[in-house]
Image: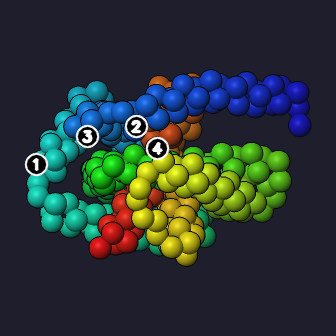
């Protein structure tokens, strides 16, 4: 590998770490100490930043069009905030159906080099329910009683653990491409490494976190199944955003986070993982 490529890779890694560590600390403080309304508002701001970037990926390059799209998402978030929980459950169910169809699309697209990308209007239409359902799930998990913040830490440990493990294991041992037509850098070795680090991270949160609260724990089988499904969903979110960027002809969704790109580049894995995790929690609590 050329020396300049190695140097660029090391610089990018340092930039990723210098950005990720402060953001992680801020997020942990928000999860642990922010009141529910404040938490919902802060996650809503992240969703709006994501909408601004999604609008560009959907083909709205002008500021006016992106502003209208972001305002539309803002109105949807406000409406969902005021809706009864039964309607919210319908939104989550619709999101699960949407992601199931997108899974089929991603697999199909990954196998066919001749298949065309999603039309601009479809990409824009998908962004609203995807971002709204992720916001709804994150705020819903946070509100699940005194242990809600711990459940969020479990979710983030799975998603972050999968991302970190996939990056380092794939970089060192990656040989077999996961979806070369969609994201050439992702490998099966990286996915397996991500699964291991995600489950280890989840186990650490469970051991440390639940020793401090008096709350029942689901069975080991539930933890393992939920962990694997969340990691799988995070990979789907990553690949789908890669498709959006490929269709839009860009490398990153934005440039707000040094070493990472845009907001969507950082939260893409959460978009399907959060609703899935929330629905799993609702199921086990009933």
Give me the disc on residue 32: 2
Q: Return the disc, 1 or 3, that comes first in the chain's sequence.
A: 3
Give me the disc on residue 267: 4
Neighbor class of circle 1 (other Cα within 10 Å; few <14, some 14-19, many 20+) is: few
Q: Nearer the viewer, residue 28 or 161?
A: 28
- Secondary structure, mark 1, is helix
Q: Nearer the viewer, mark 2 or mark 4?
A: 2
Residue located 66% across and 55% down the image: 200
Q: Nearer the viewer, residue 59 or 95?
A: 95
Work out which quarter of the rendered image holds the C terminus and state it: bottom left
Work out which quarter of the rendered image holds the N terminus and state it: top right
Do the CB atoms of the residues marked 2 and 1 lie less than 8 Å apart? no
- Res 150 visible: yes
Give me the disc on residue 36: 3
Q: Is residue 229 above or below residue 160?
A: below
Q: Nearer the viewer, mark 4 or mark 1?
A: 1
The x and y percentages for residue 137 are 32, 54
Q: Left or right: where does residue 161 sit relative to residue 190?
A: left
Q: Nearer the viewer, mark 2 or mark 1?
A: 2
Q: Return the disc, 2 or 4, that comes first in the chain's sequence.
A: 2
Corner quadrant of residue 15: top right
């Amino acid at each position: 590998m050329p020396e300049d490529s190695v140097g660029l890779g090391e610089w990018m890694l340092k930039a990723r770490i210098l950005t990720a560590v402060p953001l992680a600390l801020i997020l942990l403080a928000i999860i642990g100490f922010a009141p529910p309304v404040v938490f919902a508002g802060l996650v809503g701001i992240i969703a709006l930043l994501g909408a601004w970037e999604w609008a560009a990926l959907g083909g709205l390059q002008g500021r006016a069009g992106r502003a209208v799209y972001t305002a539309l998402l803002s109105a949807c978030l406000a409406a969902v905030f005021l809706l009864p929980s039964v309607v919210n459950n319908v939104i989550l169910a619709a999101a699960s159906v949407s992601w199931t169809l997108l899974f089929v699309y991603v697999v199909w697209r990954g196998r066919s080099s001749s298949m065309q990308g999603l039309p601009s209007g479809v990409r824009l239409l998908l962004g609203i329910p995807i971002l709204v359902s992720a916001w709804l799930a994150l705020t819903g998990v946070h509100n699940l009683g005194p242990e809600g913040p711990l459940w969020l830490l479990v979710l983030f440990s799975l998603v972050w653990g999968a991302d970190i493990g996939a990056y380092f294991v794939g970089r060192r041992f990656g040989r077999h491409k996961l979806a070369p037509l969609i994201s050439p850098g992702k490998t099966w070795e990286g996915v397996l490494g991500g699964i291991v680090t995600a489950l280890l991270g989840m186990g650490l949160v469970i051991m440390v976190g639940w020793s401090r609260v008096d709350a029942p724990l689901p069975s080991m089988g539930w933890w393992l199944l939920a962990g694997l499904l969340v990691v799988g969903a995070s990979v789907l979110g990553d690949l789908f955003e890669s498709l959006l960027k490929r269709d839009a002809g860009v490398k990153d969704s934005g440039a707000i986070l040094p070493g990472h790109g845009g907001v969507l580049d950082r939260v893409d894995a959460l978009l399907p993982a959060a609703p899935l995790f929330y629905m799993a929690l609702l199921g086990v609590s009933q």
